[in-house]
């Protein structure tokens, strides 16, 4: 009994432990925002040094540290390490936060991206399909995160060895229609979707359909970003190619 009391963590000690993890968590997030990903990785690993494998007994701060570590690894193109961290952390996050929590969904979304970047397109697609379904149900069809999930899934479908171009096109068109209506026809994000859809159509040999979309992207980006911006130059290159072949 005395031994149990000695080993028991008091509320004050628990609060102190949470405070100890909050500071490195804030620091790691700031470092990622500054694109100092190697430093963020070091900060996370130092804070997690005494922790064992991810567990549902971990505090929310510890689980968040593991997510930030995975983000930092992905940004450094350490995809296999990031995948391992996300696979280990996801079940614990899901149990602690719930399957529909934004943190859980973000972790699953990041795992999908990490898999795609390793060429594991079918697995990445499966993750992004699940994320899209959750966000449509929880956030609604026009929420920015839901639209981003449409884009992510379209990219997966385009990159799949057994490319599903028609479905990818449908996702691009869904996002374009919503952004066009909500953000306005001259918004740079509308240009991004026009350009993505023009690329998709061009790859399918549908140049006449792609040309007006490329033209629209070019006009919007010229106005909002200027002639020298990389996006404007990409749109100009695509538009010139399509115009010459028309």
Image: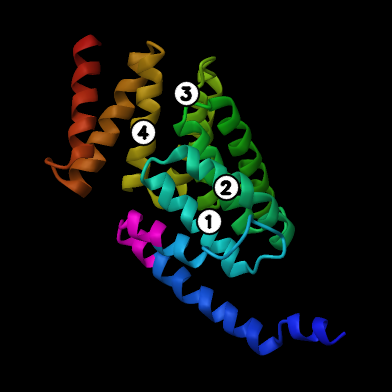
Distance Cα–Cα, label 4 vs label 2: 33 Å
Q: Is residue 21 above or below residue 112?
A: below
Q: Are marks 4 and 1 in contact (CB under 8 Å)?
A: no
**Residue where numbered disc 1 is placed:** 67
Left or right relative to 217: residue 41: right
In this rendering, which labeled residue sits more in front, label 4 or label 2? 2
Viewer-proximal residue among 123 and 88: 88
Q: Are marks 3 and 2 in contact (CB under 8 Å)?
A: no
**Residue 158: which numbered mark, if any?**
3
Measured from the top left, where is residue 219 in percent x and y? 22, 37
Q: Which residue is drawn at 54% across and 19% down?
A: 164
Q: Are marks 1 and 2 in contact (CB under 8 Å)?
A: yes
- Nearer-N-terminus badge (1/2): 1
Distance Cα–Cα, label 4 vs label 1: 33 Å
- Residue 11, quarter of the rendered image: bottom right
Tell me the crowding category of disc 2: few under 14, some 14 to 19, or many 20 or more residues within 10 angstroms, Cα based.
many
Residue stretch rendered in magenta on the structure: 30-42
- Nearer-N-terminus badge (3/1): 1
Viewer-proximal residue among 40 and 190: 40
Please identify the quadrant where the C terminus is shown: top left
- Nearer-N-terminus badge (3/2): 2
Distance Cα–Cα, label 3 vs label 2: 24 Å
Tell me the crowding category of disc 1: few under 14, some 14 to 19, or many 20 or more residues within 10 angstroms, Cα based.
many
Q: Residue at x 18, y 41 (%)?
A: 222
In this rendering, which labeled residue sits more in front, label 3 or label 4? 3
**Residue where numbered disc 4 is placed:** 194
Q: Residue furthest right?
A: 1
């Amino acid at each position: 009994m005395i031994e149990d009391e000695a080993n028991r963590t008091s509320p004050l000690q628990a609060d102190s432990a949470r405070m100890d993890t909050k500071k490195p968590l804030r620091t790691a997030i700031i470092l990622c925002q500054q694109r100092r990903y190697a430093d963020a990785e070091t900060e996370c690993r130092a804070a997690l040094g005494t922790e064992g494998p991810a567990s549902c007994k971990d505090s929310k701060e510890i689980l968040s540290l593991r997510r930030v570590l995975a983000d930092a690894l992905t940004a450094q193109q350490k995809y296999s390490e990031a995948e391992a961290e996300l696979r280990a952390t996801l079940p614990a996050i899901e149990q602690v936060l719930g399957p529909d929590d934004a943190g859980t969904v973000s972790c699953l979304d990041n795992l999908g991206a990490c898999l795609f970047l390793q060429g594991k397109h079918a697995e990445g697609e499966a993750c992004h399909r699940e994320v899209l379904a959750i966000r449509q149900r929880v956030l609604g069809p026009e929420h920015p995160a839901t639209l981003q999930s449409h884009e992510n899934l379209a990219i997966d479908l385009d990159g799949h060895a057994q490319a599903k171009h028609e479905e990818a096109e449908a996702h691009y068109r869904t996002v374009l229609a919503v952004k066009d209506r909500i953000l306005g026809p001259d918004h740079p994000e509308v240009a991004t979707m026009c350009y993505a859809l023009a690329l998709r159509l061009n790859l399918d040999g549908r140049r006449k359909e792609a040309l007006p979309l490329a033209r629209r992207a070019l006009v919007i980006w010229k106005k909002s970003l200027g002639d020298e911006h990389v996006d404007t130059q990409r749109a100009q290159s695509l538009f010139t190619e399509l115009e010459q072949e028309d």
